[in-house]
Amino acid sequence: MAYTGVTPSARSRGMVREARHLLATVAPGATWIVIFLVLPSAYLMGVAFMTNGPYGLPEMPLSLESFRRLAGFGFLGWSPGNLYTLLRSLWQTLVSTGLVVIVAYPIAYYISTCRARWRPIMLLLVVVPSWTNQVIRTFGWMNLLAPGTPLSELAEALGLISANMGLYPSNFAVTLGLVYNFLPFMVLPLYAAFEKLDTAQVEAAQDLFASPVRAFWHAVFPQTLPGLLAGIVLVAIPAFGMYVIPELLGGGKGMMLGNLVANQFAGGSNWPLGAAGAILMLIATFIGLFAMRRIGKRLGGGEEVVI
Amino acid sequence: MRKRTLKRSLTGFWWFTLAFLYLPLAVVVLFSFNASNSAATFTGISLRWYGRLMGNEEILSAFANSMILAITSSVIALGIGCLIGYGMYRHRHRKLGWLIVLIYLPIVLPDIVFGISEMAFFVQIHRLTGLLQPGLVTMIIAHVTFQIPFVALIVYSRFVGLDPTLFEAAKDLYATPTKRVVHFMLPTIKPALISAFFLSFTLSVDDFVISFFTAGPESATLPIYIWGAIKKGVSPEINAIATLMIGAVALAAIISLVFSRRRQA
């Protein structure tokens, strides 16, 4: 466009210069990401299909052994340990995402009904705890849920746990930690949806004598759906691959996929098995991203979700 | 009538949720001032754990590592990311889908997959060539990798927000591309560069998982040190160091609030 009326040779020279410019600006970063992320993850994918050597390092020949191990088939026949871990990851992801929605939905609505000058501060109050290091936040919960603390004694008095057990380590503590960790990720997109809410639709529903439940279901909920779905993806994907929270709050019986994978590279030393678990996590991630794109297109939002 | 009950119960729920969000942090802060080393009972106020921190070589070196890592990686990522951001803007009419995928990859990849990929890669490179022994260098490489996309996207969106005729004007005004960069581009995108640097810095200081898997024995950062201390058995010093880190975050929150207020005014 900029080259109309210029001789062809000058035009092609301009194109060469533009191409060189593109290369000069983009190449360093692109090369960096390719060398230090694309190659390593490609290597990891490859490792999943290799055999576990005597020192836990991957060796030839290629095999599907690590996927069989992941499904529970070992030297001593089939054991459900790894499958339990997988199911627990799925279950924890489902439960914690559900709970996050239940807490975040009213909170996001409440913030949107408050005075405009308070809203940024309220959002900041929700987000600030997630700025502190994840290890420290989880450590805080360890302190709160340990045996002998008021919360544990309360649960004991109510007969929810047996004496001197404490609320941590347990699957309950992991769920709590996940909900705590991911709450802001759900509040932010939901708040964005509530802020844009077209109240005329709600008024129309009320004018037509819709009950509050029906007015909510037909006039409010569909409008918040894009925010809700974005929030679910933002919560569920990282929750499924969570490492720190189950490691600190879960103990041996609270292990999730992230711990299974990490253990193969640290103590357990079975790289192919760990890599196979990582592939599973990647598949979950890409399904989530794909779902988000599809939903985004269908709802016509077209907006990028900004974290 | 019904509306008021709804509003009131929502207000109650709001304060309950805030308590839920701040309780774990409050416990850490409270017990950092505990006179006894019990993690369950508070016996009195004392500063002894803070005193212990100052004499703890490991914590001081972990703090130094965190700072070296965050500053070095942010500076490198700023340079590389800034170039990509500009390239993406200047050539935004071309089909750059592959570049977008590449840039989003570090953001969408789960932490743990990111961390172990790098670790496995670095270990094998080290075995084959003797280079890239796990330590600060490998951590810096890994951190730069996840910082680049954020810098690039911030710089890119700053350029997109500019009036395109400004570039024409700058072309007329300054004869050489170098002068254009120094006198026009860098000053215009300065705010974006500053926020990109601080975001990169924060991401680096806050990161645990990726650092954990790329670290060597000598290069523990603060989160890695705290993790190790928790695993070994809780010592009250962790509360003290964690409180200092929470304090830093609180300070950052206040600063960001003041800045956003000023921008509004």
Image (cartoon, coloured by chain):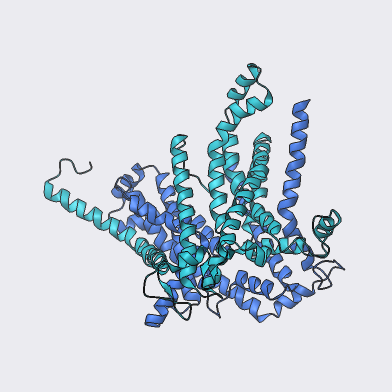
User: Vertical placement of B113 versus A207: above or below?
Assistant: below
Q: Position of residue A272 (x, y in %)?
A: 45, 70
Q: Nearer the viewer, residue A287 or A117?
A: A287
Q: Position of residue A19 (x, y in %)?
A: 24, 55
**Residue most extreme to the top:** A208
Q: Nearer the viewer, residue B85 or A289?
A: A289
Is residue B76 in sight in this rendering? yes
Asked where in the image residue A241 lies, by quadrant, the reply is bottom right
Q: Colour of chain A?
A: cyan
Q: Which chain is blue?
A: B
User: Vertical placement of B202 versus B173: above or below?
Assistant: below
Task: Give the total of numbered labels.
Answer: 0
Q: Which image quarter holds the N terminus of chain A?
A: top left
Asked where in the image residue A79 lies, by quadrant, the reply is bottom right
Q: Position of residue A67 (x, y in %)?
A: 46, 64
Q: Is residue B250 left or right of residue A267?
A: right
Asked where in the image residue A169 lies, by quadrant, the reply is bottom right
**Residue most extreme to the bottom:** B130
Q: Residue at x 48, y 77 (%)?
A: A56
Is residue B73 in sight in this rendering? no
Q: Nearer the viewer, residue A164 or A84?
A: A84
Q: Residue at x 47, y 36 (%)?
A: A301
Q: Position of residue A209 (x, y in %)?
A: 66, 17
